[in-house]
Image (cartoon, rainbow, N blue to C red):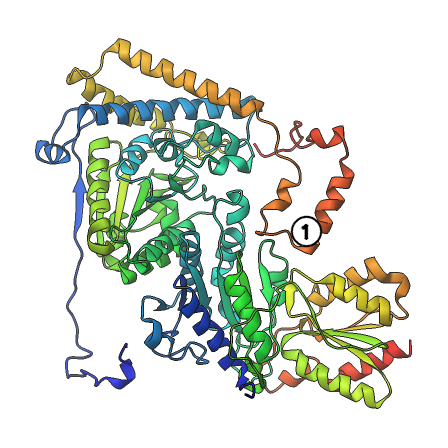
């Protein structure tokens, strides 16, 4: 039987539905996640299936959603907290940084917070202000948190199931553009994908191209285009921002000697900076050129008329690849 | 099968937008015993059905908590412990309140609840360890310690949401007799956004939560009159659709009455009794913390004047009147408490330091690859005897007061 083809949002919903079926402790809480099914329909049909006690429409309060999820997690549930847009997490930032991620350390393992915070993220969707940010670097700096960003429906399902089963808090950032923009084969049966492990999407020998999330489709195009220029790219999808799989990145860099990192978020202290530092610390003498970052600019994310100038586009990535190749 | 709202017919009527009806939840004030230890409200007192042993137990625990408090302040002054927040004067709010909890109920404390934790049988050595800068103090390791206490929460007001979340879990699980969650906070916390979010969630989800606000009049230097324009904190419950009770927080019987009522209500029928906000009107007899000097901002003589309201003194007067305790017994309770505290200090000061890799071991359930790398790096810096010396314990210049 052929593997079903799903969009990313369908894959995300399927992951939650299967996990809720498997484990009655898995619950969902968030704004409009119940009768509305979520503004992106990620929880569509779940309240009908699991009832309003397990799919909770919360008051409009992000700190409340994540703060109560911490309590639920401590008491043995496995909450999935949906924040309607990642740009609205900030009222709950204190709950994440001061509580969810510290509970295990502060109690020397007596209590912990196995919870997932799901939030639509990243831009290129002509949205309102505050609805288009790629701020994953902020969260990578938080100790005790895991940060995961899928780029395909297949990865979204496997990574989300892993996140729900993870014993620690996981921030799961879902690229809005890929909710319906990414389609792909998704096995019906539940499966997991290891958090903390990068995915070598395509092996290659000339240059390592590292990216994740919303930038992956463009990086695939860049890989194809480079092939026509005779450049054999090793394309890596980071999948997990934190903890960083520096081993895979360093090994690849040692092999190719050339690295380009692409991310939508701002350049200053971005995840690309950490990747560059890790590779430089561990593989400097293998490098044949400086590591190049192609990123969003250090400016406020523009409203959509100027949006296309903000994040990396294919020509910028190609230019970076050629510069690194011909250094 | 839940019927979608989008499939139901609207009940829209001409009065749909014309409300003007206000449902005001109940507000009450409870005081049972005056400052001379005389029972003023016999009816309420009799309802408590308190046995002499229970009253004695309140007293002993209060004296023990005070002895702990005094010792912890001294240790800090002598450089034998870290910064500390005293709960002197608030024992009367905490000890009778948690007396209503079962082991499996939850206590979600802030940083001024040492007395509540002591009443929950938290070993004193754990408290000394925690305030002495050792995370191992935060929860007893012993399997026999069943009490569900969340660790002390330092950020103000944020922990109220955890209490509500725990209560939500208890309802979702449909526990036959739901566990009750009691959380403590001060008057300052009521200005934080999370206070409102917590009370709002508790009201909407009708959770079995007991919110105990210890209005001790001062949030560091800010008097409660500058904290809120409300004439009470109890009345803030109205906005969230549930009951508020104000009590004399230095009257153990009044506190016991209000919290007993709230806990029983919360526990009733799958927790559907819902939440209660209890404001214990009390007084912070000490500084905010060892880093604070209240004499800078408090009126001269206020703290001394308030000593007459000391909850321990008040209960002592009651017990003496009722011939429940003699001066000799009072001395003996105080002496025993001091000894118990000294024993705990000895255990605290003689405990093996935690191994340095402990700072890595609880960040995640399993060490991540980057953390393994960092741990190995640290271990390589401290080899052999070096590893046993903890450079941080040494007295430092410019340390936190």
- Residue B235 screen position, x and y as percent: 24, 51
- Residue B47 screen position, x and y as percent: 11, 36
What chain is tagged by disc 1? B
Question: At 32% from the left edge and 35% from the top edge, which residue is drawn?
Answer: B94
- Residue B226 screen position, x and y as percent: 36, 46
Residue that mark 1 sits on: B371
> Is A197 left or right of A98, judged from the image as shown?
right
| Secondary structure type for disc 1 | helix
> Is A169 left or right of B280, judged from the image as shown?
right
**For residue A94, above or below residue B72:** below
**Residue A174 seen:** no
Q: Residue furthest front?
A: A1
Tell me the quarter of the image containing the N terminus of chain B.
Answer: bottom left
Q: How many marks?
A: 1
The residue nearer to you, when weighing A52 against A86, is A52
> Is A95 left or right of B117, judged from the image as shown?
right
The residue nearer to you, when weighing B186 against A141, is A141
């Amino acid at each position: 039987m052929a593997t079903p083809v799903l969009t990313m949002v369908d894959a995300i919903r399927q992951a939650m539905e299967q996990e809720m079926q498997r484990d009655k402790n898995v619950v969902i809480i968030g704004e409009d996640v119940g009768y509305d099914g979520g503004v992106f329909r990620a929880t569509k049909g779940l309240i009908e299936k699991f009832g309003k006690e397990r799919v909770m429409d919360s008051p409009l309060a992000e700190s409340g959603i994540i703060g109560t999820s911490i309590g639920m997690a401590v008491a043995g549930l496995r909450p999935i907290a949906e924040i309607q847009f990642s740009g609205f997490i900030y009222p709950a930032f204190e709950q994440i940084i001061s509580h969810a991620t510290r509970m295990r350390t502060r109690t020397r393992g007596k209590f912990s917070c196995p919870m997932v915070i799901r939030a639509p993220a990243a831009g290129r969707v002509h949205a309102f202000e505050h609805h288009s940010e790629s701020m994953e670097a902020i969260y990578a700096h938080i100790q005790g948190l895991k940060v995961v960003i899928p780029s395909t429906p297949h990865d979204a399902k496997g990574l989300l199931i892993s996140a729900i089963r993870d014993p620690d808090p996981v921030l799961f950032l879902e690229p809005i553009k890929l909710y319906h923009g990414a389609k792909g084969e998704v096995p019906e049966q539940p499966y997991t994908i290891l958090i903390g492990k990068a995915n070598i999407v395509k092996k290659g020998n000339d240059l390592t191209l590292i990216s994740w999330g919303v930038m992956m489709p463009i990086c695939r195009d860049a890989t194809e285009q480079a092939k026509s220029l005779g450049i054999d790219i090793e394309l890596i999808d980071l999948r997990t921002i934190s903890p960083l799989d520096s081993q895979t990145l360093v090994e690849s860099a040692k092999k190719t000697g050339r690295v380009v990192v692409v991310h939508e978020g701002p350049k200053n202290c971005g995840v690309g900076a950490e990747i560059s530092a890790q590779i430089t610390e561990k593989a400097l003498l293998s490098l044949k050129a400086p590591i190049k970052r192609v990123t969003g600019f250090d400016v406020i994310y523009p409203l959509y008329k100027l949006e296309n100038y903000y994040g990396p586009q294919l020509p910028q990535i190609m230019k970076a690849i050629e510069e690194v190749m011909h250094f | 099968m839940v019927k979608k709202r989008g499939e139901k017919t609207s009940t829209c009527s001409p009065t749909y937008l014309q409300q003007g009806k206000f449902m005001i939840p109940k507000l009450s004030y409870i005081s049972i015993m005056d400052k001379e230890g005389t029972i003023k409200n016999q009816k309420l007192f009799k309802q408590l059905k308190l046995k002499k042993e229970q009253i004695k137990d309140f007293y002993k625990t209060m004296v023990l908590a005070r002895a702990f408090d005094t010792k912890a302040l001294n240790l800090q002054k002598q450089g034998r412990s870290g910064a500390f927040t005293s709960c002197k004067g608030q024992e009367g709010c905490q000890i009778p309140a948690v007396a209503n909890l079962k082991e499996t109920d939850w206590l979600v404390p802030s940083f001024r609840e040492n007395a509540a934790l002591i009443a929950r049988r938290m070993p004193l050595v754990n408290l000394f360890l925690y305030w002495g800068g050792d995370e191992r103090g935060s929860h007893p390791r012993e399997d026999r310690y069943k009490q569900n206490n969340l660790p002390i929460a330092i950020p103000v007001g944020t922990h109220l949401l955890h209490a509500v979340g725990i209560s939500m879990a208890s309802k979702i699980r449909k526990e036959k007799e739901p566990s009750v969650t009691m959380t403590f906070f001060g008057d300052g916390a009521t200005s934080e956004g999370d206070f409102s979010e917590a009370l709002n969630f508790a009201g909407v989800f009708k959770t079995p939560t007991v919110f105990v606000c210890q209005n001790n009049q001062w949030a560091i230097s800010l008097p409660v009159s500058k904290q809120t324009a409300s004439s009470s904190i109890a009345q803030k419950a109205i906005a969230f659709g549930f009951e508020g009770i104000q009590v004399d927080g230095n009257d153990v019987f009044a506190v016991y009455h209000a919290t007993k009522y709230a806990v029983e209500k919360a526990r009733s029928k799958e927790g559907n009794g819902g939440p209660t906000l209890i404001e214990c009107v009390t007084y912070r007899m000490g500084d905010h913390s060892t880093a604070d000097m209240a004499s800078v901002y408090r009126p001269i003589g206020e703290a001394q004047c308030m000593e007459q309201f000391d909850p321990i003194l008040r209960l002592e007067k009651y017990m003496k009147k009722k011939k429940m305790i003699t001066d000799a017994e009072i001395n003996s309770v105080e002496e025993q408490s001091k000894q118990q505290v000294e024993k705990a200090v000895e255990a605290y000061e003689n405990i093996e330091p935690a191994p340095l890799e402990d700072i890595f071991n609880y960040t995640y359930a399993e060490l991540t690859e980057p953390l393994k790398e960092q741990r190995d790096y640290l271990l390589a810096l401290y080899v052999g005897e070096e590893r046993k010396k903890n450079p941080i314990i040494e007295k430092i210049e410019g340390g936190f007061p």
